[in-house]
Structure formats: C-alpha cells, structure tokens
C-alpha cells in the first residue's frame, strides 16, 4: 500500500496497515486485500460489485474491517454489501470511506449496505467519511443503509463525517421487529461550500421495538445541512430523535421532523435545536483562561468528540 | 490587593433614552489572604459587582486596581490568566462536553484520575460517577453547581469570585462547603451570599444597598447586626 492509502485508512478506520481477522479493503473500485475467518466469512458477489459478509451464529467479540479508499481522482465507485448476522452474534463492523481527489473532477462513492440481523444479535457499525485533496475536486458520498432488526436484536450505527466531503446524501432505512433496538449516533461537520443531507426512515413494527437517533452537527462557512427524520410507530414502541446543531458564519441548517404514531401505544419524541454557540458557554470558558476563538474551538471539539 | 475606586455601572433601558444606575460610586478594598462576603438585598448589585471584577461588564466610571495595576480595560481572558477565578451563580450547561474535559480546560492540562478525584471530592462528588458525564441538562442543579465549583478549584488562582456558591446545594453538605471556602483563605476571596453560615467564615462583610454607599466591616462588627430581625438597617446604622 502507498503512503496515501495508509493515511486514509488511518483516518477512516484507525488502521496502521492490514488488520487482523476478517477484512476487505477496497481501493478505486477493486479489492486490494481480503481475508475471511471461520467466524466471519467474506464472499465476493458474482452478479454485481460488492461482498457478502456472513457472521456465524453465536460469534461474539469479533470485528471486521471493510474500508474503502478512492485515490484515482475523478471516478464513481458503486458497491453493494450485504451483511448476514447470525443468531446471538455480537460483532463490530468498521467501515468508512476516504477519498483523496487531486483532480478537479468528481470522485464519488455510493455504498449500498443491507444488514440482516437475526434474533438476539448485536451489531456495532462504525462508518467514517473523509475527503481530502484539491479543493476544486468534488468528494462525494451517497450511501444507502438498510437495516432489518429481528426480535431482541440491536443495531448501533456510529456515523462520523468531520471534514473535506463536498457533498453527502445519506439515506438510512430501518425496520425494527419485536423488542429490537435501533440506535444511531451521528456526528457531522461541514465547512466552506459543503452540503450534507441526512435522511432517516425508521419503522417500529414489532411490539416493544425502540429506536434512538441522535445527530450532532456543526455547520460553518457557507455550508448547508439538511436533517430529515421520519419515524413510524406501528406497534407498542418507543422512538426518540434528537438533532442538535451549532451554526457558525453563514451556514444554514434545515431540520425536518416527522413522527407518525400509527399505533396508539407508540411513544415518539423529536427534539431539535439549531443555533449559535451560547454566549454564556463562551464566557464560561473565557473565565477559565481561553480566548474567544479557543473557547469556540473547544466547544465544537467537545460537541463532536 | 484588589480595589474598586469610584466605580459606577449603569445600563440603558429599552429604547436607549434612559439609563439606570446599578452601582454608584463604589469604592471598596479586598485585601489579600482574606474572605469577604458580599451581601445585600435583591437588586443591590452583588452579581453586577462580580461581573465587573471578572471583566464581563465594564464600569461606566471608576477603576479596578489589582496589585497596583489598573485592570479596568482588561478582558475576561486576560483577567482569568492573571489569576481571577469565577464560579457563577447559574452554572452553564455544555451539551456534549464531559466533566473531565471541562476540568482539563480549567486546569490547563490533561488531569489524571487522581487529580480529578481531588477536584470533585472537594465538592462532595465521586469522580468515577461524573467524569465521563456531559455537563448537560441530565445533571441536577446541585450537581452542576458543585461541578462549577470544582472547575474553580481545578483552575486555581489568586482571586476567587464565587457568586452564591451555596445556591442549590443541600444543607447537610454545608459544612464541607464552608470548609472548602475557608481553605481558600490564603487567596483573595469574594463570596456573594445571604447565608449566615458562609458569613461566619468571612473576615470582612460588605453590605450593598441600592440607595446608599456600601457598608464594610469585619465579621465581628457586621454579623450580629445582620443576624437580627432588622439586620440590614441595623448594620447600616450601627457600623
């Protein structure tokens, strides 16, 4: 791997090189390296570009890395990954994509990920998006994540995008069955002319199913963010959506909530707050010895930590 | 030594045509190595006085002198770096920032668990239960207030400005709290308070009043008058 590859892998997946265990590293639309284990098998698709990740039932405490890097400049990389998580398994999946685009063209990664969680399993899915290179070149992500959470299973999505991505349109669709749980922690920072759209559509269909979507974002420069959530409670269920954003400079944030309690036993909450950093927070940190700029940076850093 | 010389503070009312004086011709001296409690009725300007000394507000007239240097025009940050440490009456909430991070900012370095324990135990909190928690709305008013004080302890300094530090803290923790304030006696400490238990540890007490000049005296001079039924009037007449 070249230095640029290693730097990107470090940024998106904390990898210093080839990881242990199961992994699939994709570069510029091709498999750079792959390994399967007896617990987690990775099988390339034959009908389209992508892989199947098969986690055997009962596998616990294992992780799998599936990072994607794009360094070739202007290109479109579209991939279909399906995840089959066996009954009672408990795994961490580290994904993410880093784009290094030195051209003035458009580099885009479209990842279509579908998760099938069997009963009683637990998945922590960590996805980071990162872009770097020529400021004129576009670094774009348009991921679609579909999740099916069966009885007593839990899907936890940690999504982080902290800079350099010129355009994102993330669509996440979840269907949660009996006593299943769907959790999202999103952290987003946009700057300059960047645009980020996040859309969640969550269906709570099973009795005692639950979902919690928490998005924290900072928009600075002339950037634009749109957060759209659509949660439907079709059974006795609990859903909580929280969107907190800090606005700086000339940035704009649009938050659109939709909660639909189809069942009278559904309890759905949406909270959203968009605004500048509270003056009292800046002042408090200034009384601790920080300048106004240092205080602002500390608040943003802490907020997105 | 911290001195206020002929300090005025006025605010413009809505519309900007009329001004209201909050503090008028205040001259006070706060000696080193002493605790001064500032008391007075609501609206007498106690919190405003703290804001002026912290640098959050600028006097409309007069000077603030610290160790012989005129600091009237210095910013909040400059005063904080000189050793001014403030604990506000209303603790500020920080969504997303942990107690540990705030204590690290306060003391200017990464703190060890042992140091965090030291800061938090002094305000009656167990570090393990709090350091990873965010200082947000999930903490009670009393917990947030204790963490506000812990930040002041972690920052350290030479001049401590504590605005109603006991507000919201349960009464059975009071003696620990007053012991903490008493332990700062080797600094210049100003505490805004109405609580006689806090006045009992003061070296000096300042009584502020909207209508007349502040009255300053030693604890022995001021406290008996303040504690009787007509305390405020008696203190003003008797000292």
Image (cartoon, helix red, strand yellow):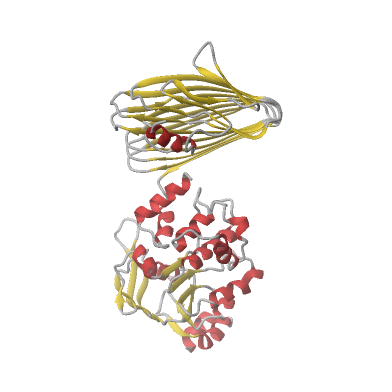
Front-lying residue, A165 or B170 = A165
Horizontal side of residue B213 vs A232, given as left or right: left
Residue drawn at x 36%, y 64% as measured from the top left: B76
- Residue plotted at (68% across, 29% down): A264
Q: Is residue A150 visible?
A: no
- In percent of width and height, residue A51 lies at 54, 20
Taking the spot 46% from the left edge, 69% from the top edge, the residue there is B156
Q: Nearer the viewer, residue A197 or A52?
A: A52
Task: Report the number of discs.
Answer: 0
Residue B46 visible in the displayed image = yes
Q: As displayed, is residue A277 above or below residue A58?
A: below
Q: Name the spot of residue B125 as percent of width and height, x first.
A: 61, 62
User: B28 or B116: nearer the eye?
Assistant: B116
Q: Quadrant of residue B223?
A: bottom right
Is A303 located above or below residue A68 in the figure? below
Residue A268 higher or lower than B29, as above or below: above
Query: Which of these two is toward me, A187 or B144?
Result: A187
Residue A32 on image: x %, y %: 46, 24
Looking at the rendering, in which quadrant would you find the N terminus of chain B?
A: bottom left
**Identity of the residue furthest to the top in this view:** A47
Q: Position of residue A253 (x, y in %)?
A: 41, 36
């Amino acid at each position: 791997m070249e230095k640029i590859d290693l730097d990107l892998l470090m940024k998106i997946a904390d990898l210093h090189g080839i990881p242990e265990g199961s992994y699939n590293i994709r570069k510029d639309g091709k498999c750079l390296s792959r390994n399967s284990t007896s617990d987690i098998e990775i099988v390339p698709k034959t009908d389209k570009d992508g892989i199947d990740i098969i986690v055997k039932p009962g596998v616990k405490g294992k992780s799998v890395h599936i990072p994607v890097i794009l360094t070739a400049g202007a290109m479109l990389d579209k991939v279909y990954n399906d995840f089959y998580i066996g009954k009672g398994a408990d795994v961490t999946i580290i994904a993410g994509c880093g784009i290094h685009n030195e051209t003035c063209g458009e580099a885009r990664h479209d990842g279509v990920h579908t998760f099938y969680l069997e009963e009683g399993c637990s998945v922590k899915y960590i996805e980071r998006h990162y872009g770097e290179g020529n400021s004129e070149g576009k670094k774009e992500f348009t991921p679609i994540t579909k999740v099916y959470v069966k009885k007593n299973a839990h899907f936890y999505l940690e999504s982080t995008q902290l800079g350099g991505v010129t355009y994102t349109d993330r669509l996440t669709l979840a269907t949660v069955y009996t006593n299943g749980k769907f959790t999202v922690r999103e952290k987003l920072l946009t700057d300059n002319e960047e645009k980020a759209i996040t859309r969640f559509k969550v269906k709570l269909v099973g009795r005692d199913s639950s979902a919690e979507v928490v998005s924290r974002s900072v928009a600075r420069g002339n950037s634009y963010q749109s957060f759209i959530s659509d949660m439907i409670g079709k059974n006795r269920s609990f859903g909580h959506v929280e969107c907190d954003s800090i606005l700086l400079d000339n940035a704009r944030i649009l938050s659109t909530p939709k909660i639909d309690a189809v069942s009278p036993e559904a309890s759905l909450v949406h909270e959203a707050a968009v605004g500048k950093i509270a003056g009292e927070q800046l002042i408090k940190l200034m009384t601790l010895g920080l300048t106004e700029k240092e205080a602002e940076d500390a608040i943003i850093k802490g907020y997105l930590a | 030594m911290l001195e206020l010389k002929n300090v005025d503070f006025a605010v413009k009312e809505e519309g900007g045509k009329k001004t209201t004086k909050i503090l008028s011709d205040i001259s006070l001296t706060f000696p080193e190595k002493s605790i001064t409690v500032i008391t007075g009725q609501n609206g007498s300007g106690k919190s405003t006085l703290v804001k002026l000394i912290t640098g959050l507000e600028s006097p409309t007239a007069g000077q603030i002198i610290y160790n012989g240097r005129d600091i009237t025009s210095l910013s909040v940050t400059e005063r904080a770096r000189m050793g001014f440490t403030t604990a506000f009456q209303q603790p500020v909430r920080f969504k997303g920032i942990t107690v540990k991070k705030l204590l690290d900012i306060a003391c200017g370095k990464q703190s060890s668990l042992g140091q965090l324990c030291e800061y938090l135990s002094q305000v009656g909190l167990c570090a393990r239960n709090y350091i990873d928690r965010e200082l947000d709305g999930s903490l009670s008013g009393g917990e947030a207030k204790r963490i506000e004080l812990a930040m002041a302890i972690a920052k350290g300094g030479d001049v401590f400005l504590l605005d109603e530090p006991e507000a919201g803290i349960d009464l059975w923790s009071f003696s620990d709290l007053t012991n903490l304030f008493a332990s700062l006696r080797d600094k210049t400490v100003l505490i805004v308070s109405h609580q006689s238990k806090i006045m009992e540890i003061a070296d000096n007490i300042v009584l502020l009043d909207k209508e007349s000049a502040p009255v300053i005296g030693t604890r022995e001079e001021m406290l008996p008058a303040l504690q009787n039924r007509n305390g405020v009037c008696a203190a003003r007449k008797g000292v």
